[in-house]
Amino acid sequence: MTGGGEGGRGGRGESLAAALGEIVGARHVRTALPERITYARDGLPTHRRVPGVVVLPGSRDEVVAVVRLLAALGVPFVPRGAGTGLSGGALANDDAVLMVLTRLNRILAIDPRNRIAVVEPGVVNVRLSAAAAPHGLYYSPDPSSQTACTIGGNVAENAGGPHCLKYGVTATHVLGLEVVLADGQVVELGSPGGEPWGPDLVGLFVGSEGNFGIATRIRVRLLPVPRAIRTLLADFSALRTAGEAVSAVIASGIVPAALEMMDQSCINAVEDSVYAAGYPRDAAAVLLVELDGCREEAVAADADTIAGILRAHGARDVLSAADAKQRERLWQGRKKAFGAMGRLSRDLVVQDAVVPRSSLPDVLEAIGRIAAAYGLTVSNVFHAGDGNLHPNISFDGRVPGLKARVDQASGEIMAVCIAAGGTITGEHGIGLDKLRYMPLIFDGDALAAMRAVRLVFDPLERVNPGKVVPVHACREWSGVRSAQWGVRSAADRDRSSNSALRIPHSAFES
Amino acid sequence: MTDRGGFEGLDSCVHCGFCLQACPTFLATGDESDSPRGRIELMRALETGELAPADPGVALHLDRCLGCRGCEPVCPSGVSYGRGLEAARALLTARRGVPPLVRAALGALTGADVSRVVYALARLVRATGIPSRLAGWGRIRFALGMLAATKPVRNAEFGMRNRSSRVNSAFRTPHSAFTPVTLFRGCVMEGLFSHVHDATIRTLQVNGYAVREVPAQVCCGALHAHAGLRDEARRLARTNVAAFGDDDTPIVVNSAGCGAMLKEYGHLVDVPGDGARFAARVRDVSELLAERGPRPGAPLDVTVAYDPPCHLLHAQRIAEPPERMLRAIPVLRVISMPDAAQCCGSAGLFTLVEPAMSRAVLAPKLASLAEARPQVVATGNPGCLMQLGAGLSAAGVPAAVRHPVELLDESYRAAGYYA
């Protein structure tokens, strides 16, 4: 797989690159094979696709011009932020253009009185919080990759993070969007106040995995930094008791800001790294529980209650972070845990599934049995309070046949999660990686409905093609459904049907 | 882990991307090909043969790497990026040779005989004061600014009268209690920063170290290794290992770039035991001084921005000791710069051979220095001193650049520690 598409594209590829260069400047168009290879993977490196051309626009106007050019030429394209996604969602085939949005990294406005910020898609998540900090505000969704990932990517994936347990995922915090559709039309979704009129199109767009177009301006809610915070680290001698403690904490009625679990294998990977946080290496699992609020006494009382519950449910020890520095260390260890998995083996697959919280103890044991049966190392680090599991399978891809075993084990883990009443993704999205699981949880009707919604935004299916909805794998229903919807081929669809999206207001006037 | 010439250090990369925002060139271009993760892809493809070392698309982005290793301390998996880079550059150099400009610069700065003449001429030019007047942007004027930045700051500018350079016996440690150390002199440090060596010797002495000279030492080989000339670097390393002998005397270094290289000798010298033993002796001057406090000096009423050299902070992971040196100077105020940990764009010969990227990396740092307006920017590496000095004068920011050890020296002189 060397991305030999260059030869295949021949003269057409060169003229496309030249035309793109006229819009964005030649140095922001990448056509050489080595350069395209650096874009062949995202944060889930088991998938690899070498894009045909990479273009890095520097402004909204350039994005629009590029999209219009590609629409005129009928070339598919894939938007990409920092490439930290974990489902292969930002990969492009060699017949497609990869549109990299890292240069659109301006924070356009911070309005502290109304607690709103307007950003371009390439703004790195943590930088928005840093910019809002002088006003006592922050941007709440905190995916573990927040020091690297972009808010545009967060919108595409409806990213979660530890603190989404209390504050909600990205969708809760996006108020409005300026979107460039596949044909180059610019539409504004949402209302200035954040309350949708008519259908919630912002809600529809957030989490659409790049299938509905490119968000070029994002209006987000900022929250006041909590005045009182307590961070607890509880360690357990068995995975099962830790899982049971999670349900007990939630049952108490206190909503923690975050409730995370790490198992022993993960603890050791972190403790071996520069992010060593002082987690007890001999623990079978640790829970990281954060309480926050406005009043010191109230949060302290909640923390005491939770610590008591944790002890009553088998915690050997409950440590409370002594100061902001220790809290930061405890969190950095958790957030960098995924990156530390490289210490276990050279290749890694991270899974993302959700199960009902109450079934965590059983599912964790089942995952352990599957790992043992396949002779694989599985490390668990996840958002326990949400029941959002992230089993990480470490392996050496050079060993013949091992990758196939990993895929089989992944499939079995997913089947266990679904059987427990769960689903196939909590926050990483479907992308390429989970296409194969979609038919396990959605029937043909549901998938056809998803596709129909997508066609409203992108009738020719040119934006991020081949992701999310397994169209080609399920030809029998996709054909039937298209006929039922009165559409013989997507190309026949009346484009003016998009006009409903063009809500004229000036939410983004700068 | 088998030895694959350094490439094995890249194996633990799982593509998480946590390095991206720590990379000055990625921040400048937003291009994955200019990021550590992207370059690791290139290096891996070079090792497997998927990409050829002759491919200009490979060379462009590996050449544009500063080698600052800012990605290493943020990597959760502990990828040895620097070692992988040197392995990859060795492959490139084996294929295409050394670019003429690099070859010329190596000869002029590190060649045993040539460099002596070059540095003598440079000092003459520097003494005329012309470089500081002509310093500015543009290749030549920036180079003149770099030369001007090497000029010792006169004591009078800090209101000092005592010009003596011998440590007053009253302030010395009793002779028997001296810890013997040897001084690594290097090339640029010896040629243009001998005043820093003098300050190093004096401040160490005040803190109970006796500095012994080692005559047969040579260049550390860092610039060679960065240019992909591993065999030349290896030869130099062997000479140094022999020159410094086989005892436990610490080898004190005041150039972060040299220190980082000397600490890598374990991987470079054919007899790894020898190289590793040598590497274990290497100490940055700030480490040795911080171990003894260091002894406080007299007040200096000056505002200092400390800019940690990448090869001290990232490569050697030395963060605290230089700050302890500065804290030993009463009244002196250290202002913290938000982007201090980021590379200044000097990176050895990088500033000469990749001027556009080098200036792009320097720009944000200059902007924050212009805002903070320190009187002195302190940094412990000759390349950084020159790069920051040239940048500050080109940007019209009135701050002097100095090695931290010079400031401590200044403070000791004011305290009357020197006879």
Image (cartoon, grey):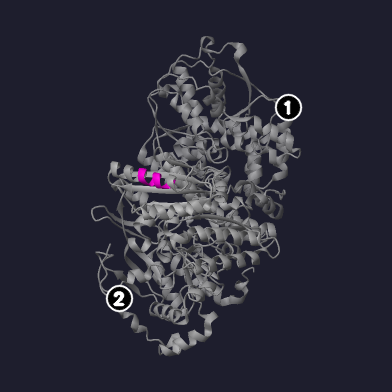
Residue highlighted by disc 1: B246
> Which quadrant holds residue A175?
bottom left
The answer as to whether the residues below labels 1 and 2 share one chain is: no
The answer to whether residue A337 is above or below residue A200 is: above
Give the SS element for disc 2: loop
Q: Residues within 10 Å of mark 2 (few under 14, many from 20)?
A: few
Q: Residues within 10 Å of mark 1 (few under 14, many from 20)?
A: few
Give the SS element for disc 1: loop
Residue highlighted by disc 2: A502
> Spatial distance from mark 1 to mark 2, Cα to Cα?
78 Å
Which stretch is magenta? A304-310
The residue nearer to you, when weighing A317 against B401, is A317
Q: Residue at x 33, y 46 (%)?
A: A302
Q: Residue at x 29, y 74 (%)?
A: A199
Q: Chain of mark 1?
A: B
Q: Position of residue A314 (x, y in %)?
A: 47, 47
- Amino acid type, residue under disc 1 in the picture: Asp
Q: Is residue B247 visible?
A: yes
> Which quadrant holds residue A169?
bottom left
Magenta stretch, main secondary structure class: helix
